[in-house]
Image: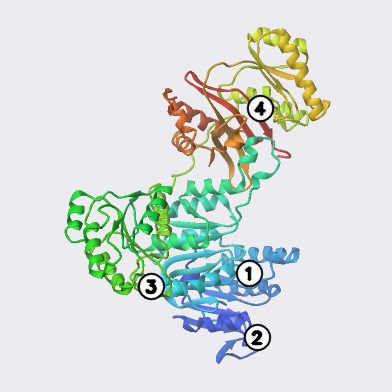
C-alpha cells in the first residue's frame, strides 16, 4: 500500500492555510515553494491574495489534477479539510499542523478521525506534526525549513523535525546533497515500510538513511527493509539505546534481551546497517552513495605522514578490515621513483615533502595492484604542501583508475580548498584517517553480509504433554513453571533433558536419589523463586543418603532465611552429570514489537558476568542458528580449544533451531531458558530449565 508517488513527483501542489503572517509556518511554506517546477495553488478563505499570489477560497475550487495538499491550518480544522481534499480527488496530503497525539487525548481523537477519513478515500498522509517534504531535484520544498537541500542521491527520513533542520544546515558546509528529505512526524498513515519501499524503487536514490525513534509496524518494517536492502543500502541511527534489560526479570533471558538488543538483531536480519552517531550516519551514507562504493575489505593507504597511516591501520583491524599487501611489482615500481626513506610497505608513506605529481604517480601505481579493493589517500598540511593541487591530482587518478577511493585531508581551514574539490568529485573526504578506516571497515563488512531471505516456516504443533503441563500451571493460577515442569515441556518437543524428579520430603528425596543412582544433585523447587543459586538452593555431587538429607535441610533453611519459608516447595533430584563440557545458555523471550527472540551464548552461573550472548529473531533455521552461534566467543570452545575435540556444530544448530520454534508453537510462553545446556562429546543435555507463562493471554 505504498502509492507515495504524489508526495515526491507532484505536478500541482496546494497549500491550505497559506498566509502572509510574519514568522508563520504557512508563510514559510509558500515562500519555499516559489522554486517548485510545477504549479502551486494557495487556499485561504479570508484573503484573496497571499504574497502576491491569488488564492482560492475553497479546496473545491482547486483545478483538477492537484496531486498534493500541504496543510498548515490549526489541528481542529484538519479533518474537515481532508474531507474536502478527498472529495476533490487529491491523492496525498502532508499535514504539517501540530496538536495531535502529542497534545493528549483530544489530539489522539483527531488523529483517529484523520486516519479514518484518509483510509476511506484511499488518500495517503505524511505527518501530522512534521517539518514537511523536500525533493531538491524538482524544486519541491513543502517544508518550513530555512533553506532547500542540495540535490544528491541520499534519501533522508527522520522522525525528528528539529534534527532535519540541523542536518540540513550542516549539509551545506559538508557538500552533501539529497534525493529527498522527509520529516515523518507522527506517522499516522505513511510509515517506515511505505517510505522505504518507495525509495528502494526511486532511481534518484542510491542510499536510504533513517533517523528512527520508534517502529510503527515491526513486521511491515522488517519485510520492506529486507526487500530494499537487496537493491540499495539502508543506514539507520536508532535513538534510545537504554538498558530495558535492567528491569526485574524472571529469567536470565528476560534480563539479557533488552529492546535495544532486539533492534540490533532485527536490523541485522533485515540487512540494515545501524550506526551510533549522527556523524557516523552521514559519513557512512557518503561512502555508500559515492560513485564507486568499496566492496572488498583490503585497503591500500597512501600518505605523506607515517603516524596517520598507522592510526588508520589500527582502526581498520579493530573493525574487521584488512590492510592490503602491496605486491612485489608494485613495491619495485614505487621504489623506482620515491625517495629512499619511503616506507616500502602499506601504508605507503611517500614522505612529508610529497607534491601533487608524487601523490598522483604513487596512487596510479597502487591503484593498478590487484591485491587491494580500495584506496585511502591521506594528506597532512606541510609548509610545502599544495592541498588543492593534490586534491585535483587525486580526482584525476580516481577518474582514470575506476577503483573506490576515500580521502582524509587533515587540518582546518587551511585544507578546506582541497576538501571542496574532492566533495565536488564525489570522493568522500574525512577530517581524520582513523575515522575513514572505521567507516570503510564497517561498510565493507556490512556489504559482505546480504540480508537474510526471511524467517523459516513453523509447522510445529505443541505436543499434548506440553499443553497439559501449561494447563496444570494455569489451573493453579501460576505463571512460573518449576524445573521439573519446564523440563517436561521441553522434553515433549524433543529437547534432551536430564531426568528430574520432584520431592516434597526428605524421605522422598532419598528414594529418588536411590532410584536415579548416586551421585545426585538437589535443587530448590519453588513456585516463586527462579534463581536457585542466589537463594542458596543448589547442592551438588551428593554421594549418599545422609548427604541428601543434609542437603534437603540446608536448602530449606537457606531459603527460609533469605526469602521466607513460603518460598520453599521441596526440591528436585537429578543424577549428577560428571561429563566435562561447555556450559551454554539457550533462551527465548517476546519483544513487544518484534515478537519471539532467541538467545544463545556462554551459560552457567557467570552468564551475566561473561556477557557472551547473541540474539536473533525467532524462529531460526539451521543456517541462521549457525550464524547466531558464530557471533559468540564461546564458539571457539565448541570448535575445539587447547587440544580438545570439536563438538557437533550441526547437531547444536538443529537443537537451537528447534528450541527457537517452541514459543511460536506455544504462544502461552513469555520467557524460557535452558541454563546450563551442557555441550559435551556425547551430545547436549539441558541440566536446568525455567519457563514463564504470559499473564492474561
Q: In this view, does 688 lie above or below 102?
A: above
For marks 1 and 4, give the one nearer the viewer. 1
For marks 2 and 4, give the one nearer the viewer. 4
Label 1 or label 3, whichever comes before in sequence order: 1
> What's the residue at 75%, 28% (across, down)?
527
SS category of the residue bearing label 2: loop
Give the image quarter of residue 286: bottom left
Give the residue pinned by disc 4: 467
Label 2 or label 4, whichever comes before in sequence order: 2
Q: In this view, does 170 lie to the left or right of 374?
A: right
Give the residue pinned by disc 2: 45
Q: In this view, does 625 lie above or below 676?
A: below
Residue 163 screen position, x and y as percent: 57, 68
Give the residue pinned by disc 1: 129
For marks 4 and 3, give the one nearer the viewer. 3
> What's the residue at 69%, 65% (across, down)?
102
Give the residue pinned by disc 3: 415
> What's the residue at 64%, 39% (across, down)?
254
Residue 160 screen position, x and y as percent: 59, 65
Residue 445 screen position, x and y as percent: 40, 49
Q: In this view, does 44 lie to the left or right of 91?
A: right
In contact (CB < 8 Å): disc 2 and disc 4? no
Amino acid at each position: 500500500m505504498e502509492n507515495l508517488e504524489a508526495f515526491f513527483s507532484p505536478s500541482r501542489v496546494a497549500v491550505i492555510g497559506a498566509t502572509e503572517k510574519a514568522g508563520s509556518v504557512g508563510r514559510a511554506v509558500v515562500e519555499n515553494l516559489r522554486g517548485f517546477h510545477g504549479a502551486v495553488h494557495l487556499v485561504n478563505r479570508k484573503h484573496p491574495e497571499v504574497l502576491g499570489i491569488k488564492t482560492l477560497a475553497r479546496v473545491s475550487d482547486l483545478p483538477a489534477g492537484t496531486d498534493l495538499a500541504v496543510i498548515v491550518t490549526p489541528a481542529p480544522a484538519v479533518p474537515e479539510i481532508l474531507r474536502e481534499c478527498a472529495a476533490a480527488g487529491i491523492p496525498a496530503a502532508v499535514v504539517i499542523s501540530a496538536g495531535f497525539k502529542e497534545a493528549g487525548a483530544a489530539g489522539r481523537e483527531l488523529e483517529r478521525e484523520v486516519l479514518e477519513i484518509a483510509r476511506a478515500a484511499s488518500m495517503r498522509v505524511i505527518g501530522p506534526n512534521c517539518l514537511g517534504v523536500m525533493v531538491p531535484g524538482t524544486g519541491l520544498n513543502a517544508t518550513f525549513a530555512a533553506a532547500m537541500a542540495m540535490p544528491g542521491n541520499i534519501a533522508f527520513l527522520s522522525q525528528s523535525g528539529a534534527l532535519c533542520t540541523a542536518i540540513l544546515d550542516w549539509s551545506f558546509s559538508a557538500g552533501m546533497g539529497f534525493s529527498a528529505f522527509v520529516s515523518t512526524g507522527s506517522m499516522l498513515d505513511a510509515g517506515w515500510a511505505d517510505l522505504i519501499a518507495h525509495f528502494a524503487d526511486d532511481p534518484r536514490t542510491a542510499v536510504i538513511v533513517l533517523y528512527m525513534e520508534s517502529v510503527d509496524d515491526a513486521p511491515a518494517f522488517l519485510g520492506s527493509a529486507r526487500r530494499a536492502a537487496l537493491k540499495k543500502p539502508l543506514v539507520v541511527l536508532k535513538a534510545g539505546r537504554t538498558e530495558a534489560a535492567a528491569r526485574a526479570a524472571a529469567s536470565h533471558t528476560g534480563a539479557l534481551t533488552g529492546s535495544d538488543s532486539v533492534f540490533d538483531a532485527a536490523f541485522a536480519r533485515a540487512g540494515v546497517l545501524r550506526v551510533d552517531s549522527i556523524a557516523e550516519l552521514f559519513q557512512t551514507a557518503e561512502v555508500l552513495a559515492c560513485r564507486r562504493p568499496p566492496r572488498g575489505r583490503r585497503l591500500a593507504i597512501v600518505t605523506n605522514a607515517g603516524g596517520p597511516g598507522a592510526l588508520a591501520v589500527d582502526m581498520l583491524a579493530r573493525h574487521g578490515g584488512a590492510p592490503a599487501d602491496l605486491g612485489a611489482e608494485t613495491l619495485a615500481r614505487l621504489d623506482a621513483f620515491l625517495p629512499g626513506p619511503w616506507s616500502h610497505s602499506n601504508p605507503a608513506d611517500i614522505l612529508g615533502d610529497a607534491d601533487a605529481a608524487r601523490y598522483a604517480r604513487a596512487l596510479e601505481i597502487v591503484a593498478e595492484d590487484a591485491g587491494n579493493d580500495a584506496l585511502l589517500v591521506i594528506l597532512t598540511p606541510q609548509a610545502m604542501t599544495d592541498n588543492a593541487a593534490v586534491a585535483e591530482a587525486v580526482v584525476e587518478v580516481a577518474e582514470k583508475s575506476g577503483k573506490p577511493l576515500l580521502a582524509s585531508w587533515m587540518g582546518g581551514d587551511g585544507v578546506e580548498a582541497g576538501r571542496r574539490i574532492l566533495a565536488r568529485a564525489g570522493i568522500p573526504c574525512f577530517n581524520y584517517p582513523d575515522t575513514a578506516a572505521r567507516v570503510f571497515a564497517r561498510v565493507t563488512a556490512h556489504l559482505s553480509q546480504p540480508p537474510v531471505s526471511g524467517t523459516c516456516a513453523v509447522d510445529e504443533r505443541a505436543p499434548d504433554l506440553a499443553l497439559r503441563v501449561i494447563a496444570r500451571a494455569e489451573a493453579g493460577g501460576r505463571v512460573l513453571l518449576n524445573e521439573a515442569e519446564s523440563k517436561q515441556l521441553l522434553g515433549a518437543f524433543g529437547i534432551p533433558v536430564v531426568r528430574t524428579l520432584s520431592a516434597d520430603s526428605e524421605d522422598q528425596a532419598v528414594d529418588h536419589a536411590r532410584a536415579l543412582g548416586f551421585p545426585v544433585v538437589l535443587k530448590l523447587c519453588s513456585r516463586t523463586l527462579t534463581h536457585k543459586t542466589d537463594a542458596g538452593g543448589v547442592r551438588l555431587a551428593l554421594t549418599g543418603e545422609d548427604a541428601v538429607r543434609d542437603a534437603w535441610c540446608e536448602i530449606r533453611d537457606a531459603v527460609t532465611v533469605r526469602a521466607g519459608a513460603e518460598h520453599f516447595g521441596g526440591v528436585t533430584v537429578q543424577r549428577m552429570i560428571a561429563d566435562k563440557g561447555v556450559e551454554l545458555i539457550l533462551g527465548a523471550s517476546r519483544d513487544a514489537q518484534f515478537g519471539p527472540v532467541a538467545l544463545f551464548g556462554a551459560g552457567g552461573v557467570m552468564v551475566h558476568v561473561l556477557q557472551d550472548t547473541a540474539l536473533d529473531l525467532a524462529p531460526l533455521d539451521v543456517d541462521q542458528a549457525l550464524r547466531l552461534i558464530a557471533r559468540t566467543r564461546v564458539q571457539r570452545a565448541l570448535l575445539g580449544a587447547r587440544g580438545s575435540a570439536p563438538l557437533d556444530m550441526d547437531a547444536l544448530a538443529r537443537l537451537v533451531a528447534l528450541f527457537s520454534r517452541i514459543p511460536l508453537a506455544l504462544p502461552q510462553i513469555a520467557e524460557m531458558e535452558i541454563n546450563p545446556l551442557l555441550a559435551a562429546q556425547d551430545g547436549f543435555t539441558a541440566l536446568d530449565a525455567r519457563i514463564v507463562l504470559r499473564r492474561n493471554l
